[in-house]
Amino acid sequence: MNSRQPVARVRTFPAAGIDGTRRQLTLGAAVLALAALTATGLWATSDSAPEMAEPDQDGIITAHGYSFYGDLTYDADFPHFSYVNPDAPKGGEIRMSAQGTFDSMNPYTRQGRAGAYSWALYESLLVSSESFGSGSVPADALGESYGLLAHTVEYPETKDWAIFHMRPEARFSDGTPVTAHDVVFSHNLFLEQGLPSYSMGVGARVLDAEALDDHTVKFTFAPDISRRSLIDQVGATPVFSQAWFDETGARLDESRLETSPGSGPYVLESYEINRSIIYRRNPDYWGADLPVNVGRHNFDVIRVEYFADGAAAFQNFQTAEYTFRQENNSRQWATGYDFPAAQRGHVVQKEIPVGTPPTPNGIVFNLEREMFADRRVREAISLAYNFEWTNETLQYGLFEQRHSFSEGLHQADGPPTDAERALLESLGDLVPEELFTEPAVMAHSSSPDRLNDRRNMRRAMALLDEAGWEVGGDGIRRNADGRTMRITIPINASGSATMESIVETFTQNLQAMGIDARFQRIDAAQYTQRRRNKDYDMIMDGYVALVDAGTGLHQRFGSEAADDVFNPATLRSPLVDAVIDEALMAPTPEDRDVALMVLDRVLRWERFMIHTWYSPVAWVAHWDMFDHPEDFPPFAIGELDFWWFDQERFDALRAAGAIR
């Protein structure tokens, strides 16, 4: 019997406009380099009406922050974000974990594996999620950015250009000033040495970056394109020291352990390759008293401990080798927290709802494989996944089935609405006839009583027969050319045993259908390389949730960046491209919402992903030495952002002999 202590459910703000609460998973370090390209939302949870940025007589808007529609939750004189504790004490240490290895402290390298949180040393003109912590900043209003290195942003109503007025007091950690010249240098560095998809996307939209003086920088944008993801893109680009790069000759895309000076609240103190990384709060941090930073960055030390795999990591959590854990293993969450420290109350468990739609994770088809060109094949293979059995047998019934790329928000349901139909009709011959009449594709249901659902298996095998993949005398499916249907799925050896069981049982069902299916357990470095090179038939991966329209939609789902790592399916669909363009050019929020609903419908129709599961809460366990605001914001857990160290609790743990 499980003897663990009851789980504390932490009270949160309601998430306006969302059906229930959803978990947002953070992106990996490589993705963070392009975070400003991703779609973000436009909700705010403040009870007061948002402040609107009004143009002057010349049509110029000058504001302390930016949102696409000009509405800002916090006014120009706000003292701090509403969800932080402005009196949170500074001090103490929090220890996190990471799995696998690292061989670089440059988060933008194209080779190797960057150290955890290595991107968080750097700041941008506008505050963004590129900081220690998880989720949005601010965490109660998505789609809004506020001045960080810049105190104001100036732009015309047409958004043809933007001028950022920078804070003269901003300093890199080596004491040198952060200037507009550094901003221009950093922008150009990403274009020249960043990922190709970044250069292609941003270079076509941002025509020029110019330092008007030491603390004023102007960006000019391309005409006749969507105005989305322009000002917020350049405002969220990390700013590096040009002097350091000039002096060292370092490149942005190289693997290196030396870090350039950042302007953020933490500096790299030390590291041991594949063992640990220590970041220390900079006592001379220039921006500590800014309203956007009050009540944040409270730990003196953030330490990251590396472990070979999930089992080793969990074992070491029990002895306080690290002190905060966000659990992603349902078996461990349900049964594993009965170790002595948890039984004595030294370790606490919490379930924290968050307010964004769940990240669209699942089993992704590599559409570059010829055998997946037929939608019937993809549908048939999808039927081999049994969510109900998997959830009940392997995941302790803790998950819910995901159907949509925008679950509960811009989710398409049933046949198209009149507004959806009108948009589809405007796209002409790109739209298959069935999209006008059929209900939105939903994840299939299966029997929870047995892994092999006979009804679904019969349907799947009939689809494969129709597609020309017939079973031979040896029980293996081949096409008319005699080619065997063979599917290999790589899995990360440092992942959880539960994940391995899920993939293994999925492949068992594929084998029962006559498919030569197998999974390969490979080390973390090899897994990373194969994922980057798309050396897989199928893979457990994910996309971003459809929350708002942004040019990141083209990077994630569009044909122009199909070969990029951020599009694991290698999706190339003129229809998807056209719908994204409609979303980007939508003249009103209502038109945007319709376009995103149509995009959700079309993406699901393409069947390039097997929708799996999601949790409506984040599972958090930590040694009882930390505290946080009573009310959580809806869009972040914020453990490294607005939590703090409680000295009295730590002393009590140490007095009890629970921790060193």
Image (cartoon, helix red, strand yellow):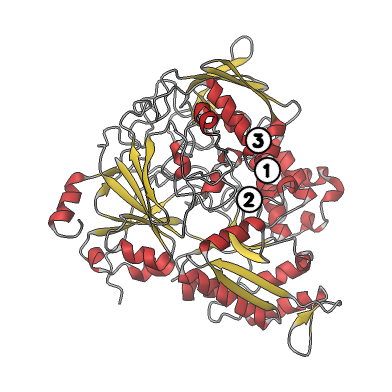
Mark nearest the camera among 3 and 2 is: 3
Residue indicated by mark 2: 566
Q: CA distance from mark 1 to mark 2?
A: 9 Å
Q: Which mark is residue 411?
A: none
Dot label at residue 192: 3
Position in image of residue 646 (x %, y %):
22, 45
Residue, disc 1: 197
Residue 37: x and y in percent read: 61, 39
**Quadrant that contains the C terminus:** bottom left
Towards the viewer: 194 or 463:
194
Q: Position of residue 364 (x, y in %)?
A: 64, 62
Inspect this view and state whether residue 604 appears. yes
Marks 1 & 2, CB-CB < 8 Å contact = yes
Q: Earlier in the sequence, mark 3 or mark 2?
A: 3
For badge 1, the amino acid type reads Ser
Question: For the residues carrying marks 1 and 2, which lies nearer the camera in this image?
Answer: 1
User: Which element type, helix, strand or loop, lies under badge 2?
Assistant: loop
Determine whether 450 is above or below 317 in the image. below
Under circle 1, the secondary element is helix
Between marks 3 and 2, how big is the CA–CA gap?
A: 19 Å
Q: Is residue 120 left or right of residue 423?
A: left
Give the mark nearest the N terminus, 1 or 3. Answer: 3
For the residue labelled by badge 3, is the local secondary structure a helix, a strand or a loop? Answer: helix
Count neighbours of disc 3 (C-alpha within 10 A) and say few if under 14, some if 14 to 19, many if 20 or more. some
The residue nearer to you, when weighing 165 against 392, is: 165
Q: Is residue 392 above or below residue 134?
A: below
